[in-house]
Amino acid sequence: MQAEAKHRPNLLGAGGWFWAGNYKMERYLYTLHRVTGLGILLFGIFHLIETTFFRRQGESVWQMTTGFLKQPLFEVGLILVAFAFVIHALNGLRLILQEFGITLGKPKRPVYPYQDALRRKRGYTMLAIAVIVILLLVFLLNRLVGGG
C-alpha cells in the first residue's frame, strides 16, 4: 500500500491547502498560520520599501505618501494586518506548547475506538481560538470607538 501511495501524483496543488479531504481543525489552523505569516511578511516588505524609499525623497513626497495611505482601503489593510499578527502570534504559541508536549497530555494505550492526543486535548485549541477571537473583538471595538 505504501509503495502505491509513493507513486500517486499530487492532483490538489495549492488548493490542497484549503480542502483536501477530511481534515480536522488543527489542519485549518495550520493553513491559517501559513497564510497570516505570508501576509505579515508581505506587509513588512511593503512597509520597509514605503518608509525607506519615500522618506528619502523629501518632506513633500513623504507628506503626499502618508496622505495617500490614510485612505479607507489602507486603514482596512492595517486592521487585517493587526488581525493576522494576533492570530499568528497566539496560534504560534499554541504550536510551541504542543511541540513541547504541554498541551498533549500523557500517551494512552491504543484501545479501540482510537483517539489521538490532539483530539483528547482539543480544549487547549478551543481556548486558544477563544482568546484570539476576544482579542480581535477588543481590537476592532477599540478601533471603531476610539478611532485610533
Image (tube, grey):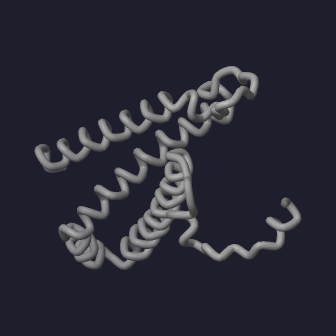
Which residue is pictured at 38% across the width and 39% down the height?
Answer: 132
User: Where in the figure is residue 17, as x and y percent of width and height?
Assistant: 55, 64
Left or right: where 39 falls relative to 120: left
User: Where in the figure is residue 91, as x and y percent of width and height?
Assistant: 50, 42
Quarter occupied by residue 58: bottom left
Left or right: where 137 falls relative to 45: left
User: Which one is in front, 45 or 109?
Assistant: 109
User: Where in the figure is residue 127, as x and y percent of width and height?
Assistant: 42, 30
> Which residue appears farthest toward the left when viewing the image?
145
> Which residue appears farthest toward the front when viewing the image?
112
Left or right: where 36 falls relative to 3: left
Which residue is pictured at 50% across the width and 49% down the height?
Answer: 29
Image quadrant holding the N terminus, namely bottom right
User: Which one is in front, 8 or 80?
Assistant: 8
Which residue is pictured at 30% across the width and 64% down the height?
Answer: 77
User: Which one is in front, 26 or 68?
Assistant: 26
Numbered marks: total? 0
User: Where in the figure is residue 3, as x and y percent of width and height?
Assistant: 88, 65
